[in-house]
């Protein structure tokens, strides 16, 4: 027991060190030490301190170096770095872009009255206005087949668009349904640091260095405006598929000033998302992470980081205690085997549903690990032994003793009452969805119907355990340590339900679990547990103390 407590204390200690280290790193990102002596040779002064007249010019080109020509799409004649604005412009798409090609935006901040190509003190960045994604499969009515013809037409247009090698720059081949197609980014978000910050040449942040352009002005070093293209604002929901008929598409140009601390933070987050994509994260997976940063303010974002750290700690502790409890479990007295089976079934269904919906890996991976653990619990609960003979598995089920059979009777009785309500609702919901909603395939309809039953009525399958607790007037048989850690995570999930993008039904299920948790707490208060007492089944739940004689009520 001492070793277990020490291990838990070690984990908590590591967690505290991790949180403190993260806070220190974040402070180092958002805080930049200014130059101590403004008149010193080590200081780099801002070009904006002289209040120059500036212009903002945006061009489009087929190549990032503008070889082959460029087209002006917008110009701000009097560009004030402190004035926020938003402009919507129509951008003409070249033929190569319409044929599954790419298009770039060249953003210039330069002196007024001079073209950016002739201004030696201009700053510019290149942003990609297109990205490649696999189109979302068409959904049809499985009964009437409605929208199927339209889907076939769109597929034929897609094959025609990407099947022309010459038009696609020599890269076009015969397309399939999984071929990436060029999509238009409808937003271009720009920022300029408006702070008149004095950099210290000896203590220049590495993340800002690649955005810094410096020139010598007499004895002073001066840096040009810090221009930044916010790639985190490019969300999947804002993408629009490009086809051969898309000759013009709208582009929303948003500008706002940004502080130096926020710029450095945004650079680090943008680099982190890019690194994830290099490790195999898809555009959709990266989009879920972008949503955490873009759709929330910095204070709520800091709270999210803290909550996420506690979620990770409670997840680990719950996992450790849950595995330890079931590993030592010898009897199913007081435990609802039906609830264990249901949790296993529902967890697998939820995992398949999330996989079918192409949900973020942040949600999908924990669901997959949970499914494996629930299958192992079923093996323990039903006392299943697997033996291999000639390469074929043989399953042997253990026998129940008298106390376990009594628990099983209560469990079966609870499920009997629930079935009168649950099965008609699930079947009726599946039939309704089949008639009035559209799906990609019959498999998609089946998974959606099952998961809707799990989310909408799944909490009813937690009730057999409550019923068994009520009949036995005891909760000593439950893994309370693991249960409490999971309960804390349930409330943390309520926060994440508003932060991470997920299906609405999955979001509502987070709040459903809160109700059941409160009922368990009420039973915990109603049926106090004396761990040192041998219960009516001859079982003591305090392993440190020797077992005494059975207590007779």
Image (tube, rainbow, N blue to C red):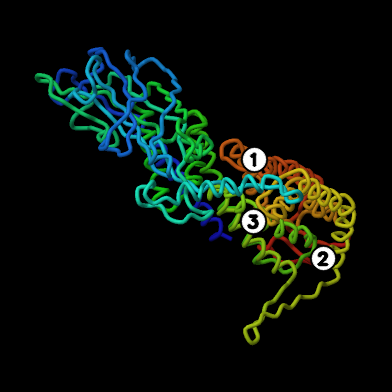
The quadrant where residue 380 appears = bottom right
Give the CA distance from mark 1 to mark 3. Answer: 24 Å
The residue that mark 3 highlights is 352
Element at label 3: helix
Which is nearer the eye, 399 or 493? 493
The nearer-to-camera label among 2 and 1 is 1
Label 3: how many Cα within 10 Å (few below 14, some 14–19, many 20+): some
> Residue tagged by mark 1?
491
Q: Which comes sooner in the sequence, label 1 or label 3? A: 3
Relative to 16, is 441 above or below?
A: below
Local packing at callout 1 (Cα closer than 10 Å; few below 14, some 14-19, many 20+) is: some
Contact between labelled residues 1 and 2, with CB atoms less than 8 Å apart: no
Give whichever of discs 2 and 1 has the lower sequence position: 1
Residue 464 is left or right of residue 278, and the answer is right
Q: Is residue 197 left or right of residue 159?
A: left
Judged from the image, the secondary structure of the residue bearing numbered disc 2 is loop
Q: Position of residue 155 (x, y in %)?
A: 56, 49
**Counting residues from the N terminus, which is met first, the one under dot 2 or under dot 3?**
3
Counting labels gives 3
Residue farthest bottom in this picture? 390
Badge nearest the viewer, 2 or 3: 3
Q: In the rendered image, which residue does mark 2 sit on?
A: 537
Q: Disc 1 on helix, strand or loop?
A: helix
Asked if residue 224 lies left or right of residue 260, the reply is: left
Which of discs 1 and 3 lies nearer the camera? The answer is 3
């Amino acid at each position: 027991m001492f070793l277990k407590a020490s291990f838990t204390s070690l984990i908590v200690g590591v967690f505290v060190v991790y949180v403190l280290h993260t806070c220190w790193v974040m402070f180092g990102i958002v805080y930049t030490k200014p130059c101590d002596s403004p008149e010193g040779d080590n200081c780099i002064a801002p070009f904006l301190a002289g209040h120059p007249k500036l212009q903002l010019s945006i061009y489009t080109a087929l190549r990032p170096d503008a070889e082959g020509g460029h087209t002006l799409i917008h110009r701000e004649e009097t560009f004030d770095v402190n004035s926020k604005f938003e402009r919507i412009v129509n951008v003409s798409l070249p033929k190569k872009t319409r044929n599954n090609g790419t298009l770039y935006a060249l953003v210039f901040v330069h002196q007024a009255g001079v073209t950016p190509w002739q201004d030696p003190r201009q700053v510019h960045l290149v942003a990609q206005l297109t990205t490649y994604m696999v189109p979302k499969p068409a959904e049809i009515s499985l009964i009437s087949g409605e929208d199927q013809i339209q889907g076939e037409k769109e597929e034929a247009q897609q094959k025609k668009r990407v099947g022309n090698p010459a038009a696609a720059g020599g890269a076009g081949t015969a397309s399939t349904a999984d071929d990436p197609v060029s999509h238009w980014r409808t937003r271009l978000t720009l920022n300029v640091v408006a702070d008149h910050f004095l950099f210290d040449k000896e203590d220049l942040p590495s993340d800002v260095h690649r955005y810094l352009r410096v020139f010598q002005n007499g004895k002073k070093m001066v840096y040009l405006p810090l221009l930044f293209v916010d790639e985190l604002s490019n969300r999947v929901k804002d993408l629009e598929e490009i086809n051969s008929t898309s000759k013009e598409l709208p582009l929303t140009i948003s500008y706002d000033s940004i502080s130096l601390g926020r710029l450095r933070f945004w650079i680090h987050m943008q680099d982190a998302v890019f690194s994830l994509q290099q490790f195999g994260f898809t555009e959709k997976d990266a989009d879920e992470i972008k949503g955490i940063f873009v759709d929330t303010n910095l204070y709520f974002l800091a709270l999210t980081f803290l909550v996420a750290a506690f979620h990770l700690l409670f997840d680990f502790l719950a996992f450790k205690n849950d595995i330890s409890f079931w590993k030592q479990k010898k009897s199913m007295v007081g435990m609802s085997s039906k609830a264990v089976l249901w949790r296993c079934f529902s967890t697998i269904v939820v995992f398949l549903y999330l996989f079918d919906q192409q949900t973020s890996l942040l949600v999908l991976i924990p669901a997959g690990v949970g499914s494996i653990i629930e299958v192992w619990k079923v093996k323990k609960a039903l006392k299943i032994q697997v033996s291999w003979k000639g390469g074929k598995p043989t399953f042997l089920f253990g026998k129940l003793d008298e106390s376990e059979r009594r628990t099983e009777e209560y469990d079966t009785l609870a499920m009997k009452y629930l079935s009168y309500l649950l099965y008609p609702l699930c079947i009726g919901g599946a039939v309704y969805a089949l008639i009035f909603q559209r799906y990609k395939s019959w498999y998609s309809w089946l998974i959606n119907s099952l998961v809707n039953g799990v989310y909408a009525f799944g909490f009813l399958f937690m009730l057999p355990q409550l019923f068994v607790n009520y009949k036995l007037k005891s909760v000593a048989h439950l893994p309370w340590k693991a249960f409490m850690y999971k309960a804390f995570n349930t409330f943390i999930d309520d926060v994440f339900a508003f932060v991470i993008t997920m299906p609405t039904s999955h979001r509502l299920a987070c709040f459903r679990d809160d109700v059941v948790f409160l009922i368990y707490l009420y039973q915990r208060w109603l049926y106090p547990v004396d761990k040192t007492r041998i219960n009516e089944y001859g079982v003591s739940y305090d392993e440190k103390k020797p077992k005494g004689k059975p207590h007779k009520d």
